[in-house]
Amino acid sequence: MTYIPISPTERDAMLKTVGVKSLDDLFDAIPKKHRFPELNLPPALTEMEAAAHLGEMASSNENVREHLVSFLGAGAYHHYVPSVVDHMLRRGEFYTAYTPYQPEISQGTLQAIFEYQSLMATLTGMELSNASHYDGATATAEAVNLAYAQFRGKRKKIVMSPSVHPQYREVIRTYSQGMGLEEAGDDASADLEVGPEALMSLVDDKTMLVVVQYPDFFGRIHDYTKLIEDAHSKGALVCIVANPTALLMLKTPGEMGADIVVGEAQPFGIPLWYGGPYLGFFTTKKSYVHKMAGRLVGETVDVRGNRSYVLTLTAREQHIKRERATSNICTNQGLLALGCSIYMSVLGKQGLQEVANLCYQKAHYAASELSKIDGFGLCFTDPFFHEFVLCCPKPASEVNQYLLDNGILGGYDLSKDYPALQNHLLVAVTEMNSRDEIDTLVEILQEMK
Amino acid sequence: MNTPTNLKYTKSDEWFDPATGAMGISDYAQNQLSDIVFVELLVDEGEEVAVGKAIASVESVKASSEIFASAAGKVSAVNKGLSDKPETLNSDPYGEGWMIKIEGGVAGDVMDSAAYETYCEGRSH
Amino acid sequence: MATVIEPTIFELSSPGRRGVTMPASDVPATALPPKDLLRSDLPLPELAEVDVVRHYMKLSKFNYSVDDGFYPLGSCTMKYNPKINEDTCRLPGFLYTHPLQPIETVQGNLALMFEMQEWLKEISGFAGVTLQPAAGAHGEFTGVLMMAAYHKSRGDLKRTKMLIPDAAHGTNPASVGMLGMSVVTIPSDSRGNVDLEKLKAACDDTVVGMMLTNPNTLGMFDEHIEEVVKMVKDCGGLMYGDGANLNALLGIVRPGDLGFDVMHFNLHKTFAVPHGGGGPGSGPVGVSQRLVDFLPAPLVGIIEEGDHETAPLYGFVTPKQSIGRMKAFHGHFGGGLVRSYTYIAMHGPDGLKDISQYAVLNANYLQARLRDTYKIPYDRICMHEFVMEGQFEGSDIRALDISKRLMDYKFHPPTNYFPLIVHEALMIEPTETENKDTLDRFADALIKIAEEAKSQPELLHNAPSTTLFGRMDEVKAARELVLCCWLPENYEQMV
């Protein structure tokens, strides 16, 4: 009866009103032989015991705040989350509320999402944003759905750069199983030195969408303007998967002419949390809004003349369009979108610029010092933001094991995903890495045999 | 309910004008959908349509509907202005709210205005 | 001009105001990238911390939440969200672990996930569970992908049709649509069960399977469930169970035992993960033995067996014929799995059965109190929710008006206009975490509103009138499509 507030007296009075003798009598419709199974689960813990048990499980991990110095990114980044964010997210009015289908009593949620939409559109340089998707990978898959719906199935080819996050490309392949798509470019053995222009030869008048990442999975900054112009001349759409921290400093995908800009907003106020839940943002142009999936908040007035907000264009969504919907998505990552907005608001323009600058400066210092070590070097010469590929004298897995023995989480071992990159680590540096930590990393690698 | 006598009607609330080859949605349909906010025409000029092929998708604040061709033929015109002013379907479903025009139109299973009015009256809501 | 009750964060901004500041850089400076790679401006808001806090505090107070009061949304399971779960999911050991860390460093996380998989299997009677899907709809899509992959693996390529009852949630046909399959709608009979005759006629060798919510969206447990399952399986189809209504079945019956092949869980419904104003949720999926090899990768498994001295080594495994990856990383570990793990640990088998027994008692109690006032189309013992018609003979009052008037009585309305097969539907799910006084007050309010509908209908037509915001102009929102606020044009010149 852990959280159940009904006393035995109340229960008996209620059973009488319903007209049955016992609680078990409510379940006569259940086939008798399967009714009331014995569940083999541990007996209930009290709150105190549960707190202790979960505390032990959590403490048995080595985490990046208390035990390990981390240089691991690859799609999830260790950033500082200002205290205000969690304090606001712990308000019951926010986290125990439902989807704002009754706008009169949900203006808090609705206005917060409207502000989130505005912040993300500004960040990416696009005209509008939806209320979010599950994560960056599924947001990218939704871009594929949009392109498919836009061309009404008349174009079925997508061109994906191999420098898009490997897990995102996997998700797109899973999602598009039933769509009969032709996929080009997604080849991990392709020459990774070539720039985005190499994709142009793969784009033709059957292409519905080109997908590239910014900065790419290897941390490299490319200007996709020419690629986008080329794709547009052939009638194809372009989706850029962007890192939000990088967008605080770099030319926006909107300025390059992108049609859709998606990405993972975990760096903005969401802890690493062993991979989830995270926050997929989705921004695009007004002309695509009717083919876009996901919730959307619009401004209006109420009967009393108050400016207010409502879920709008809901006829696009699954509960109305059913099998004709662009996507089946029902939820958005509501509370995390709120967290992202609060992160951006409390740091503000200048605070966010400071975060971006620290990531950039520290990453470049690290890259410079690491490349001075015998046997190590930077794999690519392109400009980068806060991630770079370090070429090592040994297999990346051995380097990482050595680093782990010294309390450091090295970069991401690229050999798993790219056969040509056996001795290569993807190293990420954020504002959370002090100069001492970077210097220690360098010293330890210098001593590696 | 407005049901011009010169037009033919389908059970799925589309109208067809045998004289001009135009088709659209009936007054009953626009009333059911209520405030229409989005129209997408799904066929282009020059395309052949068969009876029952989806020619448009309509969304209102609370509902979404596919509109089907009530006659077969070759599309000679599409009402491009509709996407900018979807509310035309509510205000003038038989006039400015025409969706496509076909030539050589062979009507499918259609009824005249009196039969359509009777049909609509018999429907529960 | 519209009255603005609370300006947007952009309007509250003023150039030069600072909120949280970051430390100065401790490394030698590197030149920024060339100018043509930099953005030209960053027009984001500038506020002090106190102003940010006050803004979000104001917004929070515009909301009605479960922590505020009764929230009887049918099929949403708005139960109380235990506060201990908020603490356990924020333990530093969970909060600060990176999804790509070596498995040896995160055995606590992996043990939790492995145990969750085992517990969900035990609760539902399934042979395998994936924790990866992010939400119910995501779980549905995962399930449908597995069904398709199963048939394809057996060379059974004719199967392209999914049977779905008319009362189904929109995500069911939408998931099917994403795979290019077609939907065959099966009607319900007068008792709210699947119409067996129509089902029989639809079952053939072109059927992928059936997607069934049981109890269904009418709150009814199908009285012929075993026949339904047998018919579908006899024609070679698979049974998908939409687990949205699992709150009625914990410790009562296991979908796996009834013959379901695949079912998604909604941790944000049944297992008390908070709804967060629309998300994040978590949608694990359970499968029967014949679908185990198709589960998404990666799955948590035992890499090295333990013994009585040492714990096993947990890691990730890839099922033999896996459909692939459904999202990046492992699933909603922090927000979803830790909270529901804590919840299940604190209930145990007896506690879980209590949940369903009292969820069903509460719904039946409300149904009994309201049946003389409102028409209940399927009037038999319901499960954890029931549907009634929000309309009266000779009155133009509709479900919408009743819902809005309930706000004046300080209740969140029930689900409106769903399921589609009931006119002016009001779907009520009280959950087990409400006491009898609350239920009585709610029933009394609805009875009073029914009287008002006859004697003072304008009270309903004009409702809500005691809330801060009134009814919204949804047509204006859709026609004008204002989806963003922007900084005022002269922002930079403002002081």
Image (spheres, coloured by chain):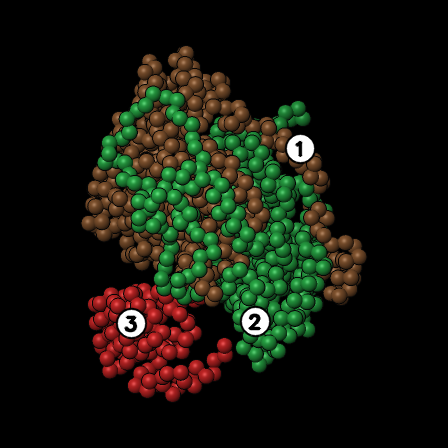
Chain A tint as drawn? brown
Residues marked 1 and 2, same chain: no
Which of the 4 quarters of the picture holds residue A47? top right
Q: Could you give the CA–CA distance between mark 1 and mark 3, rounded to whole angstroms? A: 67 Å
Q: Position of residue C325 (x, y in %)?
A: 44, 42
* Labelled disc at residue C450: none
Chain B tint as drawn? red
Q: Position of residue A330 (x, y in %)?
A: 47, 54
Asked whether disc 1 touches disc 3, contact meaning CB atoms under 8 Å apart, the reply is no
Q: Position of residue A408 (x, y in %)?
A: 47, 21
Residue under label 1: A52
> Residue type at mark 1?
Ala
> Residue type at mark 2?
Leu
Residues marked 1 and 3, same chain: no
Q: Residue at x 72, y 52 (%)?
A: A5
Which of the 4 quarters of the picture holds residue C193? bottom right
Q: Residue at x 56, y 31 (%)?
A: C93
Residue under label 3: B99
Residue under label 2: C460
Q: Nearer the viewer, mark 1 or mark 3?
A: 1
Q: Residue at x 37, y 52 (%)?
A: C484
Q: Nearer the viewer, mark 3 or mark 2?
A: 2
